[in-house]
Structures are given as structure tokens and as C-alpha cells.
Image: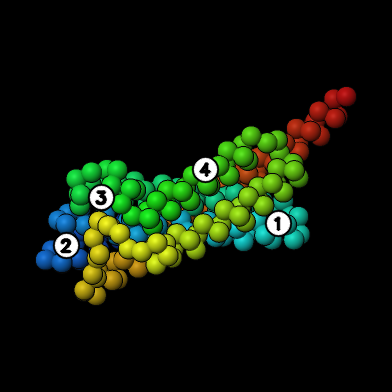
Amino acid sequence: MKLQTNNLLGWAMVIITLSFVGFWVPQEERQLGSSYLIFFFHFPSALNCMEFFLLGGVFSAIYLRNKSPSMDLWAVSSIEVGMLACTITLVTGGIWARAAWGEWDTWVINDPRLMSVYFMWLTYAAYLALRSSMDQGKRRELYCAVFGILASINVPVVYYAIRIFGKENHPMSLTLNTTSMKVTQWFGWASFLVLYIGLVRLRRNYYQRCRQLDRLQEEFNRAQI
């Protein structure tokens, strides 16, 4: 019931964000025409993907400390949702870049920060590939925990990339001049955060049920011998 409420609240907040974007953000403040509005979905997903990747690293570290299978499930669930948010970030960024520069590939090539986001996406794709290539057990949990911690190093690199590598071309340097724009920006972040938390819990429950079914299957097989 709590999970269902979480998901409903998240979707309701996203719908409210759409309403803010459509009706509250002043027309005269909309840069790049209507394509500027994608920022209010690009920004929340970009921020949330880093948060959930970090969370995956934290859960992985806790797993290494106490070897709790539950922490392994929370880690992979957080990373999967982080991958979803990161994919949305790259897709919306590409659409935004197309409107700004007229080219899709410039989105990655011209900005070290964006290249670092793409590299982060590839790193976590490798994490999921590693996990899917190994049989369930302590060995997989250990390898994935170590990988999850190492991969989380990407997050501060991405966050500070614009300072580390220097600022290159970005679709635009946005200036949020009005209260409505600032409220929409941060309400959008909160909306997606609530929605993504619900998805993490949903994935964790799914994996927990799978493990319970596996144990029941093993007990059934032993009983048949």
C-alpha cells in the first residue's frame, strides 16, 4: 500500500510539473523557443541519476561491511533506476542540442561534462552486464559491490567536470530569472525523486520475491529427492 501511494504521489507531482511548464513559466522567459522547456525534465533526471548512482555505491559499501543480501538488492535497484534517469538525461540532452546546434553528435563531442555523463552511463552498463553474466550468489554480490563502489567515483567527476575540464559549448547557459522558473525547476527535481524512489522500491521488492521463489524451488527439489 505504501509503495502504491509512493508511485501515485510521484506521478501526480510529475503531472503538476507539466502543468507548471505549460502554464506558469512566462512565455517571454522561454529561451530557445519551446525546446527550452525540455530543461525542466533534463535537469531533474541529470541530478537524480547522480544521486541514485551514489546511493548504489553507499549500499554496496554497506554490503561489504555486513554482507547483507538485502543491501545487494538495494544497490542494484538504485543503480538500475539511476541508469533510467541517466538515459533520459542523454536523450533529452540530445534533443536539446539538436535545437541549439542543429546536430545530434555535438551534444557529446563539444562538452567534456557531457562526455563524462556518457562515460558514466557506459560504466554502469558494464556493471549491469557483469551482474547478468554471473550466477546468483556471494561471489556475484561481492564483485558487484566492489564494482558499484568504484563506479560511484564517476559521480563527483561528472558533477565537477565543468570546473575540472573547463567550460566548453553547452546548449545554453540558462538564467532562471523568475520565481516560477526556479520553483518549476526544483519542484520537477522533487517530483522525479519521489517517482524514482518508488521505482527503486518496486525493483527491490521484485528481486526479493525472485529470491524467495528460488529458495522455494530449491526446497521443493530437495523434497522430491
Instruction: Determine which residue is flagged by label 2.
Output: 30
Q: Is residue 148 visible?
A: yes
Q: Residue shown at 62%/39% (left/top)?
A: 130
Which quadrant does the C terminus fall into? Answer: top right
Label 2 to label 1: alpha-carbon separation: 46 Å
Q: Are marks 2 and 1 in contact (CB under 8 Å)?
A: no
> What residue do we see at 71% from left, 56% from top?
63
What residue type is disc 2 on?
Arg
Query: In the structure shown, which secondary structural element does the residue marked by tag 4 occupy?
Result: helix
SS at circle 1 = helix
Give whichever of discs 3 and 1 has the lower sequence position: 1
Residue at 14% over, 56% down = 33
Camera-near label (3 vs 1) is 3
Q: Residues within 10 Å of mark 1 (few under 14, many from 20)?
A: many
Crowd band around label 2 with a 10 angstrom C-alpha radius: few (<14), some (14–19), many (20+): some
Q: Residue furthest left?
A: 28
Tell me the distance, in whole angstroms, between the alpha carbons under discs 2 and 3: 16 Å
Sequence-wise first label, 4 or 3: 3
**In this orientation, does residue 199 appear?**
no
Seen in the image, is 216 located left or right of residue 195? right
Mark 4 sits on what residue? 125
Q: Which residue is mark 1?
A: 63
Amino acid under disc 4: Ala
The numbered mark, 2 or 1, whose residue comes first in the sequence reads 2
Picture quadrant where residue 206 is located: top right
From the image, state whether disc 2 or disc 3 is nearer to you: 3
Q: Residue 17, position in %: x, y?
A: 30, 61
